[in-house]
């Protein structure tokens, strides 16, 4: 019995051995070595172009399928559902009263129309709630999660979609997971080794190289195709780098092109291990949970770090939470109070290839990473903006808004004053009180005119 | 999210809503997507909390009253049909020209129905009269703490005096309509829905 199984056994072992070796060699040559050296074969860009052609074809097929059935295709309209008029409260109410004719009374029953219409407009389409869910796409990218017209898919498309699923989950996902583990593992091991060296130029040089290499491997683990613009404005030592926040991947994207000091809370588990290892090689700023509440302590540690010219620029995301990459929300003023040069960076993801937004109320971190690794690719553009400093007579909030406007303009995102914290919390009463104050001025203001006449 | 939303709305439902409200096919699907994104509990109906989660509505001084207008008497949930019927009040009147012959009776977005919607924002107890108290309540909501009780009271008294024709110290719907007869209600209570 055993005698005739034996040759099969060794054959299988040999085949497995060969395929494993081939696999590892390919991995090494095409992915890891370029990551170490920082060069690229251009395979990913070719991949991206062919995918785009495929998506356009898929959308055309769906449109054709819908026309044949004489049905309507759901098309998300990026211009919005309604057209709003950007007039102020006073203007609108004066207009209302003028159209009613006669002298201007203190209060008119038609004043209510303004609030009524504004209220219903915000029910139909408001600026805030739509920023906390993934952006809707114009064309279909063969992922189930972004399909709005499942009844219009022909057989050919289904086959294509099936092939897509196989490729993504059967080939790309295991490849990416392997790379991710390699990248993270190397990071932990190498930084711990470097941590044993005495402080000095060699240590900093090696630490830089190791960090860059490991982040580049992680970038390839996500098949991230990143275009960096204006690299002459890259952040320098003694400054703070601020960027808009869409997902935890932002860190990997920025850190694979330059070295930064990270800021964050100390976590437990795997994150904690990574954090402890990283801080051995170069100074990052990790806070204990209890220290996070103490704003003075946080500010002091940040300013101390910035004052030391030999330390790397700090990377901070002032929005404080993940937004869906269609807008930039309120920047928290803490990092703008420190008084050093700020290097703004705008990150814009191309949603056609895979939605990078992390909706932390729907997905946990592991689920999110799996989603990322089973998308086609992550394509994004990074713009380094020229450095900015606080001007005379400008306070931290105004400075923060100026930086935010610059980032929004460069990245083509909407610039909002709303707080990203509205994702989870309620809006402050003070905003309603502002509206009430404005309206009262309209009432009382005209009352004063009356008493004069 | 839009992904499952449009597939849950059947063609027959869309046709019925089209007849009832006058919205176009694409407007209905897009509004359904919006309804679905507001419905955090995913139970096919919106509660008051779902509305209050919209920051721009939460800071509107009349936010609570507007939310109330969506809910029928004594109910805590509004389904998509109800949502669309209330929104239909805000369709521009010009759009009716395109849909002539579709709806029977008074369309939901006629001048009278728009005025009735606004009247009901004042008339909390639905007794078809705006009393001095009800008027004061709405005024207080709109001005907050910035105007004194006496001043507000005199504003209310003056308004009732000017509008009240039958001397019952309340404003009925016909008196309300008369006061606003020169106001361009059709335009001011309309929202420009994109096609």
Image (spheres, grey):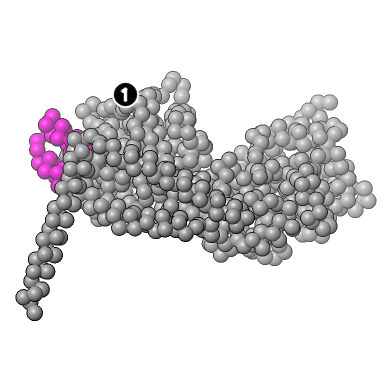
In this image, A98 relative to A75: left or right? right
- Residue B91, horizontal then vertical, whole percent: 73, 47
Looking at the image, which residue sits at the far right? B166
Q: Is residue A44 visible?
A: yes
Give the x, y percent position of residue B139. Answer: 73, 45
Characterize the magenta stretch by its predominant secondary structure: helix
Q: Nearer the viewer, residue A275 or B122?
A: A275
Nearer to the camera, B155 or A4: A4
Residue name at image x 51 percent, y 36 percent: A414
Q: A356 or A21: which is nearer to us?
A: A21
**A321 above or below A241?**
below
Q: The N terminus of chain A is located in which quarter?
A: bottom left
Question: For residue A199: magenta?
Answer: yes
The residue sitting at 88% across, 51% down in the picture is B174
Q: Which residue in the structure is indicated by mark 1?
A: A232
Residue most extreme to the left: A3
Tell me if A157 is positioned left or right of B36 in this view. Answer: left
Q: Could you say whether the residue bearing mark 1 is in a helix, strand or loop?
A: helix
In the figure, B176 relative to A318: above or below?
below
Q: Is residue A324 above or below residue A18?
A: above
- Find the residue positioned furthest to the bottom: A1
- Circle 1 marks a residue in which chain? A
Q: Is residue B145 visible?
A: no
Write the start and end of the magenta stretch as one range: A186-213
Residue A93: percent from left, percent from top: 73, 36
- Residue B74 lies in what quarter of the image? bottom right
**The quadrant where residue A256 appears:** top left
* B186 relative to A200 in the view: left or right: right
Q: Residue drawn 88% across and 49% down? A: B175
Question: Residue shown at 48%/40% (left/top)?
Answer: A326
In the picture, the quarter occupied by the C terminus of chain A is top right
Any magenta on residue B178?
Answer: no
């Amino acid at each position: 019995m055993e005698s005739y199984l034996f040759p099969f056994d060794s054959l299988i072992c040999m085949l497995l051995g060969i395929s494993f070796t081939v696999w590892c060699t390919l991995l090494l040559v095409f992915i890891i070595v370029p990551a170490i050296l920082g060069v690229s074969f251009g395979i990913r860009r070719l991949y991206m172009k062919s995918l785009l052609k495929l998506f356009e074809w898929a959308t055309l097929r769906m449109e054709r399928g819908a026309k044949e059935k004489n049905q309507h295709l759901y098309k998300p309209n990026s211009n919005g559902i309604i057209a709003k008029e950007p007039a102020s409260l006073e203007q609108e109410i004066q207009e209302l009263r003028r159209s009613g004719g006669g002298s201007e009374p203190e209060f008119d029953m038609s004043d209510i129309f303004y609030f009524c219409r504004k209220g219903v407009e915000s029910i139909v389409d408001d600026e805030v709630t739509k920023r906390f869910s993934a952006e809707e796409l114009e064309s279909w990218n063969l992922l189930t999660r972004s399909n709005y017209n499942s009844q219009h898919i022909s057989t050919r498309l289904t086959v294509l979609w099936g092939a897509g699923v196989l490729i993504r989950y059967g080939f790309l996902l295991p490849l990416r997971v392997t790379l991710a583990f390699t990248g993270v593992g190397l990071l932990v091991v190498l930084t711990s080794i470097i941590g044993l060296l005495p402080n000095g130029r060699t240590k900093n040089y090696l630490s830089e190289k190791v960090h860059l290499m490991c982040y580049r491997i992680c970038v390839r683990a996500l098949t991230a195709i990143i275009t960096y613009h204006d690299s002459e404005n890259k952040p320098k030592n003694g400054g703070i780098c601020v960027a808009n926040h869409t997902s935890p991947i932002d860190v990997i994207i920025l850190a694979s092109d330059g070295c930064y000091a990270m800021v964050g809370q100390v976590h437990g588990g795997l994150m904690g291990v990574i954090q402890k290892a990283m801080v051995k090689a170069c100074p990052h700023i990790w806070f204990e949970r209890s220290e996070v509440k103490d704003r003075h302590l946080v500010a002091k540690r940040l300013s101390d770090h910035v004052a030391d010219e030999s330390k790397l620029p700090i990377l901070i995301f002032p929005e404080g939470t993940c937004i869906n990459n269609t807008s930039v929300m309120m920047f928290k003023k803490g990092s703008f109070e420190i008084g050093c040069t700020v290097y703004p960076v705008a990150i814009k993801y191309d949603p056609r290839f895979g939605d990078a937004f992390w909706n932390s109320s729907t997905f946990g971190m592991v689920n999110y990473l799996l989603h990322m690794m089973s998308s086609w690719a992550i394509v994004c553009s990074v713009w380094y903006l020229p450095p900015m400093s606080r001007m005379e007579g400008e306070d931290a909030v105004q400075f923060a808004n100026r930086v935010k406007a610059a980032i929004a303009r460069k990245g083509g995102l909407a610039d909002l004053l709303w707080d990203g914290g509205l994702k989870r919390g309620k809006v402050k009463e003070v905003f309603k009180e502002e509206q009430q104050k404005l309206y009262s001025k309209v009432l009382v203001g005209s009352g004063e005119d009356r008493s004069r006449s | 999210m839009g992904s499952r939303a449009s597939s849950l709305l059947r063609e027959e439902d869309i046709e019925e809503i089209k007849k009832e409200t006058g919205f176009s096919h694409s407007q209905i699907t897009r509004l359904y997507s919006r309804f679905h994104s507001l419905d955090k509990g995913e139970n096919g109906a919106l509660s008051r909390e779902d509305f209050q989660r919209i920051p721009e509505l939460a800071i509107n001084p009349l936010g609570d009253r507007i939310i109330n207008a969506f809910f029928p008497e004594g109910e805590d949930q509004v389904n998509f049909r109800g949502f669309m019927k209330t929104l239909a009040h805000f369709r521009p009147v010009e759009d009716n020209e395109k849909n002539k012959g579709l709806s029977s009776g008074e369309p939901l977005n006629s001048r009278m129905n728009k005025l009735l919607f606004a009247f009901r924002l004042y008339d909390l107890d639905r007794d078809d009269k705006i009393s001095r108290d009800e008027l004061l309540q709405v005024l207080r909501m709109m001005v907050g703490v910035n105007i004194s009780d006496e001043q507000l009271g005199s504003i209310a008294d003056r308004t009732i005096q000017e509008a009240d024709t039958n001397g019952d110290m309340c404003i009925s719907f016909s008196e309300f309509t008369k006061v606003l007869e020169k106001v361009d209600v059709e335009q001011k209570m309309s929202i420009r829905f994109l096609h």
